[in-house]
């Protein structure tokens, strides 16, 4: 059992509490930086996809996991980011400007959604965001001059400072830098007053208000930031798939983002990472499962939907803290070994607590 | 300057008058207690003062400023802090982080500088931590600093509520039944803390209490309420020995 | 004028279906504070079951529908007892994701059992035309409206006059008090789920002649959600009125403004209601006591 002896308030503020942790993360960073040398182009593409989902997952985690606002419509922001970025690139705007602008546009829509959402709680917010996303999807379909409607929008090749990033390696580094930067930003927010205000908002609105937290600006900023992250995800996603069509930004994408948060582990940034890996590995897992099942079932296209649903239900029922929760439990087991008590994480019986009166 | 005054305060839910023409004045540095049987409207008055509810009539004045329509978070910034009868702590966070939220009124945070964690933000974090540690020392909460609230016993949570309010460095603090759930020893500690809060830290205390011994020990002024209406106001021994008040508690 | 009347009837018919699905939402929400995102998929499953009972097993329309309703009620009960009951007490996010997951599994199951193709279900009221106030109106629409009204009248009587109905209301208003009064709260909740599933099945059977049956027909639920919100998430009457308004608005907007609006109108209505009057037309506002 490693005991951390704190001698300075800075230890609680810094990213890494001790040398040991810092080294581990440093090693991870080296591994990520050197990945192109270690893996095939296909695998590199998969890791890029994980990084892309990570960006969106971070946004979703900040909004749902930390601020406690459930949104069933974040696919809309991914789509706005994707289309905006594509359109700006087509107009000749350089990538480094176009991506943040796309994110900002998504954030702006996020603010427009967040302001009326101030009066909505829990269930009503979820329903409202679902409707909002459906309307936005229709806009994608109908606004053909900008989005190309159903016929789609072919993405130009990304290029940075004149260099074309059309290979998987270049694109990987782009994703890596963006993901790392946004991850750091999120970590910082959570150790600062903004993050604490969000968590206060999630756990007790009334107490948060009495502590001077301006509920409206906290909620709207959470919405705006998560929309920004999802917009950036959209921009990168657009490059990855190469061709934009409105049905890529359907409620299914929103559900996948929520699944990422739930399965990864609500309320932790590591959870976003685990969740992103999970989401990207699902199709692989699915083809595995298909090989096992009898032909008649395996051929069904809706098997994917069924598997998603099953996993969703399983995680809610048996591992509500997600993969991160399981990871923390395993770490705890080893850190107190051999004095681990089996009942440590047994969940208490809970009674229905009415959320109608918040 | 009127430090804090309430005049003609009234609150109706539907047709039900829960608070009826309540008025009183609190001087700076005093301990003012609100007593009354359950359902008398004491917590409602607190909710009106901290602006969780909107009063249907009446005026609230704090430091010569009319705060009757000022939103709750602004009132917190003006210097009014409170604890809650049913604990409203942030269950999933550690005690330390709960107290740090109490410092929110003293932080000027914005999304960008927080995300970039500038020098200013970092120094502010260290300053806030120092202030919070000061309160932790004052209330003897060192052992529980890094424990999540959901793992803490009820008595400790009640004290944490007070700690969080103190971290705001308020001018006026509203304590809603601080001794409920505390054993006699802890209640004695509470009496000392209330004394220190007013005499050492110069914070005015508004108190809702059921424990009459505590009330007579710490209060300077007592107001007795029943069914939303004022019964008696004055020095502790006057009010506590008032036959009207006794009748309200025991039921006529 | 005839066109307006026809649109009105058609809109009312669509609205009735929305209203029934909304009713399912309302029943479960009032009892367990869960928005059952699988409601539409229960409708779909009910329709498929009815199809099997009526066509494959040749039980005829009425007997087949009854069997489908009973089977679906049992399935609804099981969903609550085996799955949803376990997450009582957890934050709403958990239940939202759970019902979404259940819905997805139902869709997959239906697709595996019956295949992904669209099916038809003939209504016993042969697709004829009646004349109402001089306008030709499809009997299918009339049957939908009539069926809904009869069902809702029955439900109203059930909640008002039977012991179980009253017990369900009590359990949904104050769980703890119901427990103390000795009511089997958990079983009552499962009964509510069974009832909601049964109502959805009826809705599915009513709408099948019009919209055809396929595993994705559950998406109707999103629009029914607008109806539920508009009605205030609180009563049979509210759900029906909400449904009627959404159904009629949808058709009129599509006919007189822009065809594309048909898919968007329910969502616009929902957003407007939530922004302007979150408690809907007939709902009540609640406040937390601190």
Image: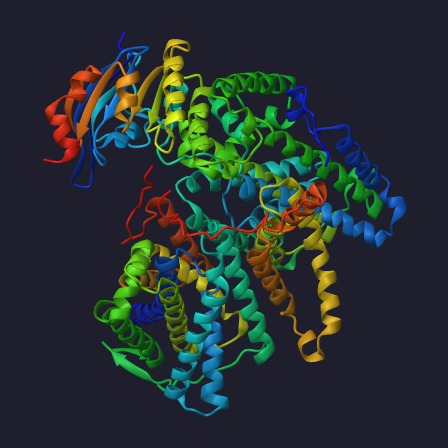
Using residue A225 as the reference point, say whether residue A326 is left or right of it: right
Would you place residue C56 above or below residue A26 in this image? Answer: below
Would you place residue B22 above or below residue C177 in this image? Answer: above
Taking depth in this image into account, of C125 and A45 the one nearest to the observer is A45
Check the image and tell me how it is coloured: rainbow
Residue at image location 32% in from the left, 58% down from the top: C179
Residue at image location 68% in from the left, 80% down from the top: A296
Using residue C106 as the reference point, say whether residue A356 is left or right of it: left
Residue at image location 55% in from the left, 62% down from the top: C101
Residue C3 location (% of width, % of height): 32, 70
Question: Furthest-right residue in view?
Answer: A37
Residue at image location 12% in from the left, 30% down from the top: B247
Taking depth in this image into account, of C134 and A342 the one nearest to the observer is A342
Residue A185 in view of the camera:
yes
Q: Quadrant of residue A204?
A: top left
Residue A181 location (% of width, % of height): 71, 34
Q: Quadrant of the C terminus of chain C?
A: top left
Would you place residue B106 above or below residue C117 in this image? Answer: above
């Amino acid at each position: 059992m490693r005991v951390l002896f704190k001698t300075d308030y800075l230890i609680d503020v810094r990213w890494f509490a001790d040398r040991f942790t810092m080294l581990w993360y440093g090693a991870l960073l080296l591994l990520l930086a050197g990945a192109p040398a270690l893996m095939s182009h296909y695998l590199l593409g998969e890791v890029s996809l994980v990084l892309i989902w990570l960006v969106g997952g971070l946004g979703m985690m900040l909004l749902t996991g930390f601020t406690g606002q459930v949104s069933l419509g974040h696919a809309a922001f991914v789509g706005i980011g994707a289309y905006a970025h594509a359109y700006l690139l087509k107009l000749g705007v350089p990538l480094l400007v176009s991506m943040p602008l796309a994110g900002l546009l998504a954030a702006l829509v996020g603010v427009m959604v967040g302001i009326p959402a101030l009066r909505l709680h829990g269930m009503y917010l979820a329903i409202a965001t679902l409707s909002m996303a459906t309307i936005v999807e229709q806009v994608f379909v109908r606004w053909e001059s900008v989005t190309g409607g159903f016929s789609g929008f072919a993405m130009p090749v990304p290029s940075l400072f004149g260099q074309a990033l059309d290979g998987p390696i270049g694109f990987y580094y782009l994703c890596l830098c963006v993901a790392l930067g946004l991850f750091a930003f999120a970590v910082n927010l959570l150790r600062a007053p903004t993050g604490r205000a969000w968590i206060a908002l999630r756990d007790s609105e009334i107490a948060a208000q009495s502590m001077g937290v301006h509920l409206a600006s906290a909620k709207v900023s959470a919405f705006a930031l998560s929309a920004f992250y999802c917009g950036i995800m959209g921009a990168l996603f657009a490059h990855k798939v190469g061709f934009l069509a409105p049905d890529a930004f359907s409620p299914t994408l929103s559900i996948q983002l929520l699944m990422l948060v739930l399965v990864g582990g609500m309320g932790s940034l590591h959870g976003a990472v685990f969740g992103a890996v999970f989401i990207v590995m699902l199709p692989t897992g699915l083809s595995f499962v298909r090989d096992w099942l009898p032909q008649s079932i395996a051929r069904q296209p809706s098997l994917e939907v069924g598997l998603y649903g099953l996993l969703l239900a399983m995680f809610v029922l048996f591992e509500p803290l997600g993969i991160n929760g399981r990871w923390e439990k395993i770490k705890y087991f080893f850190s107190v070994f051999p004095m681990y008590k089996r009942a440590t994480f047994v969940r208490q019986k809970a009674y229905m607590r009415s959320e109608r009166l918040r | 300057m009127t430090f804090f005054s309430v005049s003609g305060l009234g609150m109706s839910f539907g047709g039900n008058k829960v608070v009826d023409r309540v008025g009183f004045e609190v001087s700076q540095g005093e301990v003012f207690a609100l007593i009354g049987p359950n359902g008398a409207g004491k917590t409602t008055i607190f909710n009106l003062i901290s602006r969780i509810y909107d009063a249907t009539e009446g005026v609230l004045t704090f430091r010569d400023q009319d705060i009757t329509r000022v939103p709750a978070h602004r009132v917190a910034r003006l210097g009014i802090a409170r604890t809650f009868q049913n604990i409203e702590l942030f269950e999933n966070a550690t005690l330390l982080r709960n107290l740090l939220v109490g410092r929110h009124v003293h932080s000027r945070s914005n999304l960008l500088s927080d995300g970039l964690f500038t020098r200013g933000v970092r120094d502010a974090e260290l300053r806030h931590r120092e202030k919070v540690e000061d309160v932790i020392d004052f209330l003897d909460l060192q052992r529980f600093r890094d424990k999540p609230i959901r793992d803490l016993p009820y008595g400790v949570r009640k004290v944490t509520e007070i700690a969080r309010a103190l971290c705001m460095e308020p001018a006026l603090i509203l304590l809603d039944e601080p001794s409920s759930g505390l054993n006699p020893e802890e209640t004695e500690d509470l009496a000392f803390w209330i004394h220190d809060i007013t005499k050492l830290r110069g914070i005015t205390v508004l108190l809702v209490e059921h424990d009459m011994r505590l009330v007579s020990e710490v209060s300077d002024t007592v107001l007795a309420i029943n069914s939303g209406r004022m019964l008696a106001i004055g020095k502790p021994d006057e009010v506590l020995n008032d036959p009207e008040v006794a009748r309200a508690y025991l039921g006529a | 004028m005839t066109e307006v009347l026809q649109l009105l009837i058609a809109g009312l018919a669509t609205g009735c279906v929305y209203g029934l699905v909304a009713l399912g939402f309302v029943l479960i929400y009032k009892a367990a504070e869960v928005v059952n995102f699988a409601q539409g998929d229960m409708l779909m499953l009910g329709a498929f079951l009815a199809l099997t009972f009526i066509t494959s097993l040749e039980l005829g329309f009425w007997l087949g529908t009854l069997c489908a309703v009973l089977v679906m009620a049992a399935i609804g009960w099981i969903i609550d007892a085996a799955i949803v009951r376990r997450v009582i007490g957890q934050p709403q996010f958990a239940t939202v994701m759970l019902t979404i997951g259940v819905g997805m599994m139902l869709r997959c199951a239906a697709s595996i059992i019956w295949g992904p193709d669209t099916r038809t279900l003939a209504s016993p009221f042969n697709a004829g035309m009646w004349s109402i106030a001089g306008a030709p109106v499809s009997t299918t629409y009339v049957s939908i409206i009539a069926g809904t009204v009869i069902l809702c009248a029955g439900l109203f009587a059930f909640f008002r006059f039977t012991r179980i109905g009253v017990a369900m209301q009590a359990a949904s208003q104050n769980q703890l008090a119901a427990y103390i009064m000795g009511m089997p709260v958990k079983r009552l909740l499962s009964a509510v789920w069974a009832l909601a599933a049964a109502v959805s099945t009826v809705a599915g059977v009513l709408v099948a002649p019009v919209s055809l049956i396929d595993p994705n027909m559950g998406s109707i639920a999103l629009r029914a959600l607008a109806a539920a919100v508009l009605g205030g998430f609180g009563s049979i009457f509210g759900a029906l009125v909400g449904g009627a308004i959404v159904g009629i608005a949808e058709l009129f907007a599509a006919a007189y403004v822009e065809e594309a609006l048909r898919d968007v109108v329910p969502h616009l209505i929902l957003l407007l209601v939530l922004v302007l009057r979150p408690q809907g037309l007939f709902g009540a506002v609640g406040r937390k006591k601190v």
